[in-house]
Image: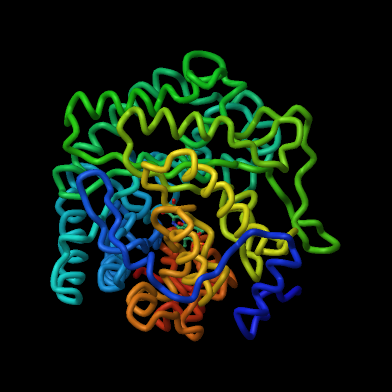
Amino acid sequence: MPKYFTYKSIEDLREDIAKLGLSIRLETEIKALREPVKIGNFVAGNALGIHPMEGCDGTLDGKPDELTYRRWIRFGQGGCKMIWGEATAVLDEGRANSRQLLINDANAKDLEDILTKTRQAHREEYGTDDDLVIGLQLTHSGRFSYKKPFIAFRHPLLDKTTFIDKKTKTPIPDDYPVVSDDYLLKLEDAYVDAAKLTYNIGFDFIDIKQCHTYLLSELLAAKTREGKYGGIFENRTRFVRNVIGKIKNELGDKLMLATRINVYDGLPYRKDEESGIGVPRPYPIPYPYAFGVNETDPLQVDLEEPMMLVKLLRNLGVKMVNISMGSPYFNPHIIRPFERPPIDGYESPEHPLIGVDRHFRATSEIQRAFPGLVIVGTGYTWLQHYLLYAAEANVRDKKVSIAAVGRGAIAYPDYAKDGLTVGKLDPKKVCLTVGFCTALMRAKNNELGQFPTGCVPRDKIYVPIYGESKRGVKRDA
Ligand SMILES: Cc1cc2nc3c(=O)[nH]c(=O)nc-3n(C[C@H](O)[C@H](O)[C@H](O)COP(=O)(O)O)c2cc1C
């Protein structure tokens, strides 16, 4: 198993960055991260954030449960001033797992309660929460919905690994329908209902999630789909344009709009059985099945359409865009560079620094093209305690407005507090990117059909949970 993160000092890391010809910069004096960031009518008190990180630990009807509260409250205490609340399905059938949060009338009070407690935890720690911005990510899991797949278009590679029965690994049949235009039209209204609820609950913003190859992300790539939601760019963005238009009709400018987008879907990978390393599944050229890829060389990022999308969204009034890429299911090294493969993954086909650099480059190109827009950056966690220095450099260089952390925040929820007070992160608390959180996410063998996820190496309450998931012991908590 290759070991990439071997750095004893920042110089060692800089040496590798130079050797690989990458442009990642590190700044050790923490200044820019302390500066407030204006987001629409809100102000976040610093430039550090927490990405949406679901814990798969809600109740079966989609309310936050004990561990959900614990995670959110720890995030509230952590010192980041922008918390991007986790994936919350707008319809039960669009949930990615049986314990994903679900927004509806019945759950609104509970979502309000978790928001209140998160804010309260922040106030107790920092005296005020006036400069804390918290949103909620609204999602439909599309192809990856746990009850049955909802596909935006027939994908010649992914359809082979999209199962109608996960236990028997039965792929969707050739006559499996794509979601109809009528379904999408009704789904737009479900997003609007969810947006109204989110606003009434008191979240500062909603994220109309368009990343990680879930339904709205897949729609952006639906070049081969027929009808008014497929084909040309205008059709592929119809859904999000309609949703924003309908929300504006109902709420005017009262609710701040944000979105997390994939700027590069990449190709599906599989594990090479001999080497264990990830290799792209054989793909046709041209490759019209992904967003943000060069169709004649889909290993390459092509930001032409993502730039058009950001421009469109900005013109429609979106105030904050979180830049991401890849899919947790078919190219995990793209979405989250790792040291050790996730349970259903493969050894990284590239040095993880290349993956970090891919995130930073794409984000900085977008931030440069839209200097007035709040751009949130991804891809920091693999850098472990050096992530703070990359965040400082990127914010200082105006390559990003807010640097946010995903896995790093479940390992070390108060990373921002340490980063901004002590000026450095504790190497003993950082995420090691060794994949236990994904292993728990994939563990379904209990009564609830889903184990909760968290950081096994850094958060001891997840150690017995992980043990049970390995043993396949039935548990009901
Ligand atoms: C356990 C887990 C839960 C996640 N939940 C979400 C989610 O709810 N919504 C989302 O957009 N991304 C989610 N992600 C992706 C992260 O937000 C983030 O994009 C990814 O981990 C890369 O950032 P990092 O390198 O800082 O971890 C999740 C990732 C993990 C490992």
Q: Could you tell whether 98 is left or right of 297 in the image?
A: left
Tell me: residue 190, above or below residue 139.
Answer: above
Image coordinates of residue 476 in percent, x first then y, are 36, 68
Image coordinates of residue 184 in percent, x first then y, are 40, 24
Q: How many marks?
A: 0
What residue is drawn where x is 36% and y is 21%?
Answer: 185
Residue 22 visible at all = yes
The image quadrant of residue 30 is: bottom left
Image coordinates of residue 66 in percent, x first then y, are 27, 69
Tell which of 397 and 110 is nearer to you.
397
Name the image quarter holding the N terminus: bottom right
What residue is drawn where x is 38% and y is 62%?
Answer: 50
What residue is drawn where x is 56% and y is 26%?
Answer: 222
The image quadrant of residue 313 is: top left
Q: Could you tell whether 84 is left or right of 163 in the image?
A: left
Tell me: residue 160, above or below residue 137.
Answer: above
Tell which of 454 and 313 is nearer to you.
313
Image coordinates of residue 260 in percent, x first then y, are 42, 44
